[in-house]
Image (tube, rainbow, N blue to C red):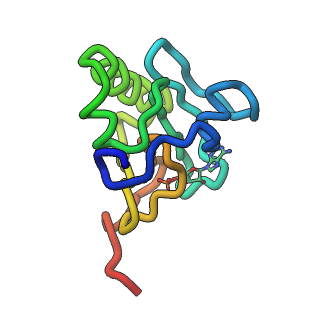
Amino acid sequence: MSVSGLPPYDPANIFARILRGEIPCKRVHEDEFALAFHDINPLAPSHVLVIPKGAYVSAADFHAGATTEEIAGFWRAVSLVAKSLGLEATGYRLLANMGLHSGQEVPHFHVHILGGWPLGRMVSPPA
Ligand code: AMP
C-alpha cells in the first residue's frame, strides 16, 4: 500500500504509458522532473496536467518519497507551465486529487492547472 492508502504504483496506468511514449499526449512542457500536457477532457479553457517523471501514486507518496530536487523541480515546472499558458495575470487554480473521496482517476500523481475563465466555487457539496 502506498503512503496515501492507495494501492501500490501500477506501471500500467495511463500516465506511466504517456511517460514511456506508448500513447500520445498534447505536450506543453517537458524537463528532467516533469511532463505537462493538455487534459483530454478539459474543464476550463486552459486545463493542463503536470506529472512528475518518477513513479508516485499520489501527492502524499511524492512528498514522502521523492528527493528534494525532484520536489523542487516539479513545483517549479508547475509554475513555469502556468506562466507559459498566460494565466498569471488573471489567475488560475492548482488541484491535486488523492484517493477515494477526491475521485482520483489516474494513480500517478498529477497537478491540474485550470484557468482561462472565472472558476467558481472551489468545491460543491455532495449531491
Ligand atoms: P484525476 O481525477 O485527478 O485523477 O484526473 C485525471 C485526469 O486525467 C482527468 O481530468 C482526465 O480527463 C485526464 N486524462 C485521462 N486520460 C488522459 C489522457 N490520455 N490524456 C490526457 N488526459 C487524460
From this view, report whether residue 74 is shown above or below residue 38.
above
Residue at figure coordinates x 50%, y 32% from the top left: 85
From this view, report whether residue 125 is shown above or below residue 30.
below
* Residue at the extreme front of the image, as rendered: 1
Depth check, front residue: 61 or 81: 61
In x, y percent, where is residue 80?
A: 40, 23
Q: In which image quadrant can residue 37 be found?
A: top right
Q: In which image quadrant can residue 6 be found?
A: bottom left
* Residue at the extreme bottom of the image, as rendered: 127
Q: Is residue 115 left or right of residue 20?
A: left
Q: In which image quadrant can residue 19 be found?
A: top right
Q: Is residue 21 left or right of residue 29?
A: right
In x, y percent, where is residue 11?
A: 59, 36
Please state the total of marks drawn on the protein image. 0
Residue at figure coordinates x 29%, y 29% from the top left: 65
Depth check, front residue: 98 or 116: 98
Residue at figure coordinates x 67%, y 34% from the top left: 17
From this view, report whether residue 25 is shown above or below residue 45.
above
Task: Identify the image quadrant of the C terminus.
Answer: bottom left
Residue at figure coordinates x 53%, y 26% from the top left: 35
Depth check, front residue: 62 or 110: 62
In x, y percent, where is residue 107?
A: 49, 48
